[in-house]
Image (cartoon, grey):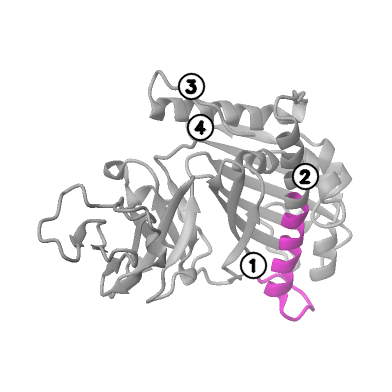
Amino acid sequence: MYLRNAWYVAGWDSEFKQGALTARKLLGDDIVFYRREDGQLTALEDRCCHRAAPLSKGELEGDALRCMYHGLLFDCHGRCIEVPGQERLSDKMRVRAYPVEIRDNLVWIWMGDSSSARPEDIQRLHWANKEGWSVEEGRYLHYDSSVQLIVDNLLDFSHLGYVHGKSIGTRRQGSIRPETQFSSESVSVRFTTMNSGAPAFARELGQLPDTVDRFNYYVWHIRGNLFVQDSVIAPVGEGYESAAPSTMKLHTFIALTPETETTAHYFWATAHNNFSSSVSDLTQKLTAQVEYAFDEDRRIIEAQQQVLRSAPDAPMIAIAADATLLRVRRMLDAMIASESGPNVPAQTAH
């Protein structure tokens, strides 16, 4: 089951081209996106109400979309406005239209009750047009695993020294307990590693000393699956607010949108301050380093999903490092149960 009354990322704004139809499966729903003549986005159920032909195989006619099986024409609100050879149109001749908004170069879609959609609830990303910061947007991974396994990974710092020992993590990080603070729909995590060896990517791209202080502060927003992290790698003693030229400051966002119960969309970007470096094409190389680390996660998580497919009822024994992710799972289950009604039990997918 999914939490539907939430804004999810459907894609990067640049993915949706004028004059093109873009099909995407989100939370198990097949959806077709297109831009109207004024550039605004429309999202419709990708299933003609007549004979279930995919509308993504249709053709645009101005702001309307024609099904190319029997010619039904739908407006941007999902209403059928023409049936060839038929004058009277039933009010039932319609497809679902989803609320969509564009914020910070991302397309957000509301998957639940349209009357509950509030654009002001969309989380904002702080690097957008921020002076002194650089970012390479448009990053994406497809996961052959459930969203919940990815969430578990993001809420667990104990894997850093093992999955990421040759990239962004160190073995010492695997033994440090983060500080956590919960609100009704999110968890904030503060993770600090003092007097630690600089990670491999920082040594390669920056001019930091061999020993550094590391600060990782992030918020996981349960509604909509949004991870926003601010990270600082600074010379020892400089602190989180360090102004030293060598200090690396990173702002990372990850938006997870379920595709199905066992596949997921993973939209992300990492912005950085202009720290001192002798590397050319710094933003591209930093993005490549982060992508490498994210791919390390993807490989182990997809392997985990394969094991769960073959033995779905096998128990998983919790350890102390699981405390945060298990509590977030319980919070999500309660939110889904509240949304679904008192008689529908909620259970997050493995």
**Amino acid type at mark 4:** Ser
Q: Of the two numbered discs 4 and 3 on the same chain, state the one appearing first in sequence.
A: 4
Determine which residue is flagged by label 2.
Answer: 303
Closer to the camera in the image, 328 or 132: 328
Residue contact at pointers 1 and 4, CB within 8 angstroms: no
User: What residue appears at the point 74 percent right and 41 percent down from the top-left corner?
Assistant: 306
Closer to the camera in the image, 321 or 314: 314
The disc at residue 273 is: 1
User: What residue appears at the point 57 percent right and 67 percent down from the top-left corner?
Assistant: 138
Q: Tag 1: Cα neighbours inside 10 Å, few (<14), some, or many (≥20)? A: some
**Amino acid type at mark 3:** Pro
Closer to the camera in the image, 301 or 122: 301
Closer to the camera in the image, 103 or 43: 43
Q: Of the two numbered discs 2 and 1 on the same chain, state the one appearing first in sequence.
A: 1
The disc at residue 222 is: none
Determine which residue is flagged by label 3.
Answer: 345
Residue contact at pointers 3 and 1, CB within 8 angstroms: no
- From the image, give the main secondary structure of the stretch colored magenta: helix
Q: Determine the secondary structure under disc 2.
A: helix
Q: Tag 3: Cα neighbours inside 10 Å, few (<14), some, or many (≥20)? A: few
Residue contact at pointers 4 and 2, CB within 8 angstroms: no
The disc at residue 183 is: 4
Q: Nearer the viewer, mark 4 or mark 2?
A: 2
Looking at the image, which residue sits at the far top? Answer: 343
